[in-house]
Amino acid sequence: MRERLITLPKKVDKRGNLSFIEDYQQIPFSIARTYWIYDVPGGQKRGSHAFKNQEEVIFAISGSLDVVLYDGQEERRYHLNRSHIGLYVPNKMWRYLENFSTNTLCLIVSSMPYREDEYIRNLREFKKYIRTEHEEIVISNKKNEHINIIDPYPGHTTTVFDCNLIIKCHKCGETIGILIELRT
Ligand code: TYD
């Protein structure tokens, strides 16, 4: 799944504007945790990690900041500077926050409570984690039975003599190989 900007309702009023969020309405999940980052000294960077399962929406309630996302293939940068526009960040996405303006208040809502084992804090580990996810494949035999396995030899090639079993990528459905023999 990809990140996307979420525009919240904005009740414009001469007494001051008002925006709001609710589970499964403006926020595409149930909010389990809210935290905020503030008093960030100039030039500081936060984040530099990915979450295995949790999703988040990031807001610049006041001030501005850049959110930089990396999905294992490309890096994308979002500049947040409006109270009513948030960035939805799906799981399995490397992220860091930088370029905070003075007095920025960054509010983050998350789909899960805080758990240290949800974090991947090392970029190399993240790249490995993403690769392993993609290498999860499905073998379907002639009876159309499906068995989930992890490819023990990523990137290997196989000479094909018989086409009994087809190996497909679990995520994109693409055929990535043919298993010649399956002993049961
Ligand atoms: P962390 O998420 O590592 O911040 P950053 O990636 O921006 O450096 O959090 C910093 C510390 O705060 C870390 O010790 C964990 C703690 N923390 C909580 O206890 N609960 C929370 O909800 C969050 C976000 C952090």
Image: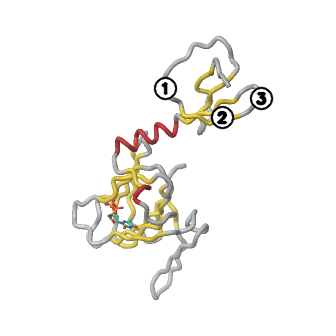
Q: Amino acid at mark 3?
A: Lys
Of 86 and 92, the residue lying toward us: 92
Tell which residue pokes out farthest to the bottom in this image.
Answer: 15
Per the image, the residue denoted by label 2 is 147
Label at residue 96: none
The residue positioned 63% from the left and 34% from the top of the image is: 173
Kindly indicate the quadrant of the structure image that contains residue 78. Answer: bottom left
Question: For the residue labelled by badge 3, is the local secondary structure a helix, a strand or a loop?
Answer: loop
Q: Amino acid at mark 1?
A: Tyr
Tag 3 and tag 2, C-beta contact below 8 Å: no
Question: For the residue labelled by badge 1, is the local secondary structure a helix, a strand or a loop?
Answer: loop
Taking the image in four quarters, ligand 1 sits in the one at bottom left
N-term-proximal mark, 2 vs 1: 2
Tell which residue pokes out farthest to the top in this image.
Answer: 161
- Mark 2 vs mark 1, CA separation in Å: 17 Å
- Residue 130, compared with residue 50, is above or below; it is above
Compared across the picture, whether 4 is left or right of 81 comes to: right
- Mark 1 vs mark 3, CA separation in Å: 25 Å
The residue positioned 49% from the left and 26% from the top of the image is: 153
User: Tag 1: Cα neighbours inside 10 Å, few (<14), some, or many (≥20)?
Assistant: few
- Mark 3 vs mark 2, CA separation in Å: 12 Å
The residue positioned 71% from the left and 27% from the top of the image is: 141
Q: Where is the C terminus found, in terms of image quarters? A: top right
Kindly indicate the quadrant of the structure image that contains residue 137. Answer: top right
**Where's residue 25, x and y in %?**
61, 68
Per the image, the residue denoted by label 1 is 153
Compared across the picture, whether 46 is left or right of 161 comes to: left
Per the image, the residue denoted by label 3 is 143
